[in-house]
Image (spheres, rainbow, N blue to C red):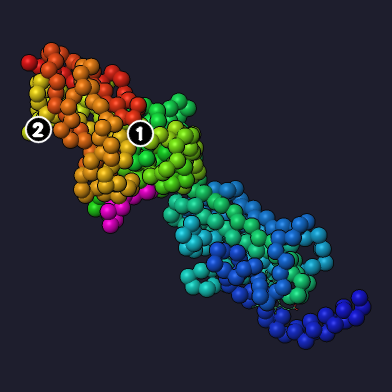
Amino acid sequence: MAKTSRCLFVVSAALVPFLLAYVNRVPAGHAGVPGEANPPCSPCHTVTLNPAGGGVSVELSGGLTYSPGQTQRVTVRILDPDTARRYGFQLTARTEGLAQAGTFRPGSDTTLTAQAPFVYINQTASASIYSFEWTPPDSRELVRLYVAGMAARGTRDSRVYTTVVELRPAGTPPALRAENPVVNGASYAAGISPGAWITIFGENLAPAGVSRIWNPATEIIDGRLPTSLEGTSVTVNGRAAAVYFVSAGQLNVQAPDDDATGPVELKVTTPSGSARATVALLRHAPGLFAFSPQRSRYVAAVHAGGTLAAPGDLFGGDAKARPAKPEDVIQIYGTGFGPTTPPTPAGIVVREPAVLADPGALKIRIGELEAPLAWAGLVGAGLYQFNVVVPSLAPGDHLVVAEIAGQRSQPGLYLNIAP
Ligand code: HEC
């Protein structure tokens, strides 16, 4: 025992000039950021990583949130059962993409270490508590503080404790409405299917005042639809959905491809937090698009020439509309009708129309009569078109129902027929 101590003393004494120079210079890149020295502070130190009985904690004056540009006090505490040890630490702040996040101002016993473009803060003397300032970035994104705290006996026996603290921009986390928060984007009925447009209702789903669709010129890249708008993203069963529209109260997204069926988790994430719901993922969850007047009573239908197929006064004379006649071929639209031939992946721009994989599984009924189908397939991301021959029916409103593999489109949807 005595021999070991003396030996250490001799080594330490020889290193005094180096040690004095060293304490200001813990090399950068040892805070435990993914891709850095692992374990942190190796290989110079022989490290025992996160042994039981000790730890490192990081506390911020603003808690776990930040406001862009508003400086906060950061306190790092190192706890080790052997209080005779000497302490040190290194900390850095990064975005999700691991870019530097904000700036540090050292307090006592701390200094900055740069390794462009990254900045670290670390000890200049042994202390079990270090305190300094951090000024957050202007961007509103998730920030992670990575810290490695050390309780050392020289370099040969160093206990390193690591932790990661997640900070979010101050703001209210998103919430989903209690009843039916996730519905088919055409029918607003429960149940979703891969590739289908879905609508999500809630609060704080996007920053207040925001209400927009994607920008095709800047946000659709190489035919890939965006998976995040204004910091809002959605996953279904852990897979990213394409995001078309965001507002605080409503999102429109395209469900990703997935072979799973049954209850799965849908998660909405914003810079201020996330919200989850359990949704039923089906192979087919068909819904037909409707014209919005009269509480979506009429199916969105178009004549061959482009005139809308609806009662003439449905749009108050603004848009040209005329009812359908028996024998007319009209186009109706839906989402959630399942696979196509060739297969069309979700999340990309559809450049070539693709027919339904099993056209025989689809039946469209108008007024209880089966309407012959001239064509049935996908014409845009998540968007199905059906060219339907109007059956011989009396003038008036007739129910329209699409059924595929036993699943039906919404009830209460009509086509207006005139002689
Ligand atoms: C490039 C090599 C190197 C790296 C990397 C390194 N150190 Fe050191 N460290 C040294 C040397 C050399 C000494 C002095 C050796 C001695 O005291 O026996 C030392 C000593 C220390 C001491 C004083 C130990 C004592 O018992 O007096 C502390 C505290 C310390 N380092 C903290 C850290 C922390 C924290 C990290 C990681 C964030 C780190 N070091 C990473 C080389 C390194």
Horizontally, is 395 left or right of 180 in the view? left
Residue furthest bottom in the image: 14
Mark 2 and ligand 1: say if the CB distance to the nearest ligand atom is below 8 Å.
no
| Nearest to N terminus: mark 2 or mark 1 | 1
The crowding category of the residue bearing disc 2, from other C-alpha atoms within 10 Å (few below 14, some 14 to 19, many at least 20), is few
Q: Amino acid at mark 2?
A: Ala
- The residue under the point 46% across, 52% down is 141
Which residue in the structure is indicated by mark 1?
284
The image position of residue 297, as x and y in percent, is: 24, 20
Q: Amino acid at mark 1?
A: His
- Residue 413 visible to an observer of this rendering: yes
Q: Is mark 1 within 8 Å of ligand 1?
A: no
Q: Could you tell me residue 366's position as x and y percent?
A: 20, 20
Task: Identify the mark at residue 362; answer none if there is no mark.
Answer: none
Q: Residue furthest front?
A: 360
**Which is in the foreground here, disc 2 or disc 1?**
1
Specify the quarter for ligand 1: bottom right
Range drawn in magenta = 219-230
How many numbered discs, if any? 2
Instruction: Identify the residue at image location x=11%, y=29%.
Output: 329
Residue that numbered label 2 is attached to: 304
